Amino acid sequence: MDAELPPWAIRLRAERRSRLWSQKEMARRLVEAADDETRKCLPVRETIIRRIKAYEAGHNQPRDPYRLLYTRVFEISEAELFDMPQAPSRPALDDVLAKLPDSGALTSRLPRTGRRIGMSTIADLSAAVHRLRLADDVLAGGDLLQPAFRELDATTRLYREATYTENTGRALLSRIGEFAQITGWIASDAGHHEQAAKIYRLGIRAAQEAGDCTLQSNLLGSLAYQITNVGDPNEGVTLAHAAVDAAGPHAPAQARALAWDRVAWAHVQVGEADAAMRALSEASAALEDHSDEDEPAYLYWVNAHELQIMEARAYTELRRPLRAVPLLTDVLHRYDATHARELALYLSWLAVALADANEPEEAARTAWRMFDLSKDLASDRTTRRHRVVLDRLAPYRDVPQVREVIERCR
């Protein structure tokens, strides 16, 4: 059985056992090896023990700070302890950001002649951007495009023209970043991909200037997701890893989970199954750290069910329907029916997985439900999924249920 484990997993277990330490004792020593700042960010002991078990089972390789803590506890160099083929080197975060075209839309106009604003205005903007996010849960991109553009433009003009303190200015930049993220998402759903990319880049710049690493990660991940789906997936991989780097190991748990989720999806699209599975493990491990910390409002939707959906979608794209179908069926059984677009999208992956599992009748029934849900949605994403589902059903056109769906939906 050990022969199936990666060398680093065997080494971690062997080093622990040679010292006659239990996994509980190993967790205690890892905590003791952390400096004060790192120790504050470590999860509860039970979570660390679960991670140790996962590491020794070879599910995912430790990353910092655990990687560093292991080297301290065992007094073995990182190169020796984790001796394995190096992953392809990836551009540093600064290099990735430097290559993103600059929108230039945040240039201030001097002298400023607008009204003076304070934190009450920031609170109003926070409420407005969250209303837009909640509207996106139940409406498609084409229905929200103009209101979103108006909100983003108004907030950007406020930054250029109003007067405010330095602290208010940073908060205003973060609100611009948040409006850019949801507006870019809406524009992408409406099929305006070039415009969405430009808006995302505006948001990335605003988050940079605000010093908001978590928001910067969210925007980079959103851009990575779009490029993975409608551009070059290899570029999507690079941007998704940049989102992980931007978040860093001490970002809120939901932020790290979402960043790793984007990495997983990008690797799926370039056919790198092992890398995708490792990223999904990282996402799950990150979410286990979630407690009652103050997460940004824009991460309200990141939870275990969403990670399960991403895992199922990954298995579907990798043509592993026996894993995908149970996961999707379980989630969709309790999914909020008011979120019609997302429900339709997830049904599309279930239809594809059922077709791959040689269940054409059930695939046709699922596809018809997906088409019926999304027929009036102004969403480019659902339109693209229509084509994917119909193409995947095509080999079964001799099955009456499938033929009816194809004829009625073409």
Image (cartoon, rainbow, N blue to C red):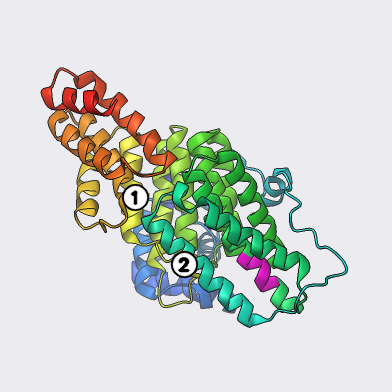
Magenta span of residues: 170-175
Magenta stretch, main secondary structure, is helix
Horizontally, is 10 left or right of 221 in the view?
left
Res 314 label = none
Spatial CA distance of label 1 from label 2 is 18 Å
Residue 341 pos. (x, y %): 34, 48
Considering the image in quadrants, where does the N terminus appear? Answer: top left
Residue 240 pos. (x, y %): 54, 47
Horizontally, is 331 left or right of 283 in the view?
left
Residue 270 pos. (x, y %): 47, 33
Q: Is residue 234 magenta?
A: no
Horizontally, is 309 left or right of 116 in the view?
left
Res 131 label = 2
Q: Is label 1 in contact with label 2 (beta carbons under 8 Å)? A: no
Q: Secondary structure at mark 2?
A: helix
Residue ID for mark 1: 342
Point 79% across, 58% down: residue:
107
Considering the image in quadrants, where does the C terminus appear? Answer: top left
Residue sitting nearer the eye, 236 or 91: 236
Horizontally, is 22 left or right of 363 in the view?
right
